[in-house]
Amino acid sequence: MADKEELDSLCKRRGFLWPSSEIYGGEAGFYDYGHLGARLRDNWERMWKDFFLGLGEHYHMIYTPNILPYRVLESSGHVDHFSDVLVQCKRCGNSHRGDHLIEDIIGVSAEGMNKGEISTFILEKEIDCPDCQGDLGEGEDFNMMFDLDIGPKGERKGFLRPETAQGTYMNFAREYRALRRKMPFGLATIGSAFRNEISPRQGVYRLREFRQAELQIFFVPEYNQGSFAEAYENLSTKKIPVLRAGCEEQKKMSLDDLDDLPKFYRYHLGKMFEFYSHKMELSEDKFRLRELSEEEKAFYNRIHFDVEVDMGSLGGWKEVAGLHYRGDYDLTQHQESSGQKMSVPIDGERKVPHVIELSFGVDRNIWALLDLGYITGDRDWIDLPVDIAPYQVAVFPLMRKDGMLERSREIYDLLNSCFNAFWDKSGSIGKRYARQDEIGTPYCVTVDYDSLEDDTVTIREISSTDQIRLKVSDLKQELWSYINKEKVFKNNN
RNA sequence: GCGGUUGUGGUCCAGCCUGGUUAGGACUCAAGCUUCCCAAGCUUGAUGCCCGGGUUCGAAUCCCGGCAACCGCACCA
């Protein structure tokens, strides 16, 4: 099981990730990706795009700004629902959410109360601090969104976006036309989102600036299922680890077993499973799809499953992605606020499409890969999917003499033209293998005395440390087929 | 945001209580030697007291403030 401190240390030491603005003491909730982390993240994002855009004929990437004007987030509900009134106890100093206090203690809904109303209510009803019974102070607004002023005199209010999704929803109508009215269609985006968390914790798990990869699928419920029926059938009996709301224990269930959920939603649950199982290569006892209860899920979500990963470094099951059936909430909100039509004509009627959102925290997924992949013992190494490792192959001379150094450099140049390759001549051969183990490089090529005779090299695979000997002329092709999993690396000796 | 603990080369730690030579070790890194395959060895070298203020002849060490990290609480539509 990955130890948080050891993994943090490795990430810093080798160049994956570490707290941002470090030389000035840092600022909680911000992380930098170093040269290896950046490669890993880029590769993960590429893999994500390849997989999820591949799910639909009409699925595409878009990019939208980090800054959104006030009205957008007002319409989406974020201005109301993303800000809370906090009340601090004058005696013990603990902060509480004013609306929760009123609801929990008096049993009255505090929905829509502003800070003045909450303060007055608390005073009138003589609500005390639930922790120490001390007197409570005035309510103060706390908004999770970073606000900013747009324009030279700051005359217009805006926010750093708290999620990437709104930029996508706003482009629904334009892309619907540009994509020539195909339905269902999908818009994906990858980018930064910002939340002014009260207490960022646990490394990249809760950040103030983080990356999201999201796919919004627009569809009209009665009209979508036909085109996905076949793809669903291929998935329908595969058992996947599921924890349903209200259940104590997770179970292996097939999509067919989840027959209270719409088929289109189940199909995407299946695809989320495939991504974690086949692409991220997580073992099935390390991740699950957990359904959120009515109390846990946001009001606009009709169905909500999270993907959770069992991460030792973070103390157990942690959310890394979500599958949200948001109904027509988002498009209806924007239609009403903007006055722009968000409906599509179907059989002579106009319907506002529904949205299924596949939402991934990029940083959390990167951490999950490192956490689950980090293996310590006789040998410390990271077990990463070979196609997203920062480097796919490293090249070494067995020794720095008799021409091996020069030949290894030539072979490095050869491989670096089509892979992310690394060349290392310093230290002993064992040290060099160890360095690559620690950053998850799946293959290491070594030039030895035989290489100089017959133009072969050894190639070593990270998980087994087994080696085979290949002709240099076959090296590119063989490596290519290992990385693309067309061929299994196998030591025949 | 509250409470507790902590902050020393790239990493991990000793030194702090009881202020005083050149801040020590392990690993790492670099250059070289050696080495016929998994962190070996030898030589040489590089890098550090979180930031700011105070006390003092003198601060890594004591005091105050800030920042950050860890644990717990709260928060996480």
Image (cartoon, coloured by chain):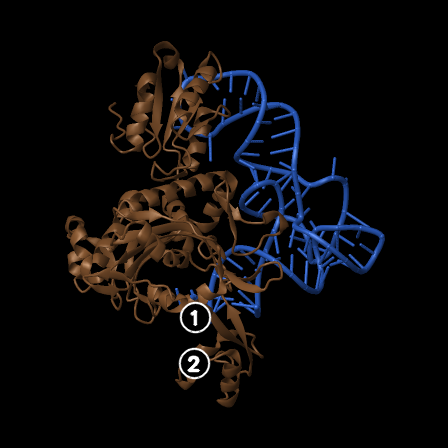
Chain colours: A brown, B blue
Tell if the residue under mark 2 belongs to the same chain as the one under mark 1: yes
Residue A242 picture quarter: bottom left
Q: Amino acid at mark 1?
A: His
How many C-alpha atoms fall within 10 Å of the one at disc 2: few (<14), some, or many (≥20)? some
How many C-alpha atoms fall within 10 Å of the one at disc 1: few (<14), some, or many (≥20)? some
Vertically, is A92 above or below A394?
Answer: below
**Residue B31 as seen in the image, left or right of residue A393:** right
Q: Which residue is mark 1?
A: A81
Q: Which residue is mark 2?
A: A110
Q: x, y percentage for residue A423?
A: 46, 26
Vertically, is A116 above or below A320?
Answer: below
Q: Residue at x 30, y 19 (%)?
A: A474
Asked if residue A57 shows in the view, the reply is yes
Badge 2 marks a residue whose secondary structure is: loop
Q: x, y percentage for residue B41?
A: 53, 25
Asked if residue A282 shows in the view, the reply is no
Residue A288 picture quarter: bottom left
Badge 1 marks a residue whose secondary structure is: helix
How many numbered markers are drawn?
A: 2
**Residue A1 as seen in the image, left or right of residue A31:** left
Please state which of residues A446 and A83 is positioned toward the viewer in this rendering: A83
Q: What chain is tagged by disc 2? A: A
* Cα distance between the residues tagged 2 and 1: 12 Å
Q: What chain is tagged by disc 1? A: A
Q: x, y percentage for residue B47?
A: 65, 37
Q: Amino acid at mark 2?
A: Ala
**Residue B10 as seen in the image, left or right of residue B60:** left
Please state which of residues A31 and A211 is positioned toward the viewer in this rendering: A211
Q: Quadrant of the C terminus of chain A?
A: top left
**Residue A21 as seen in the image, left or right of residue A102:** right
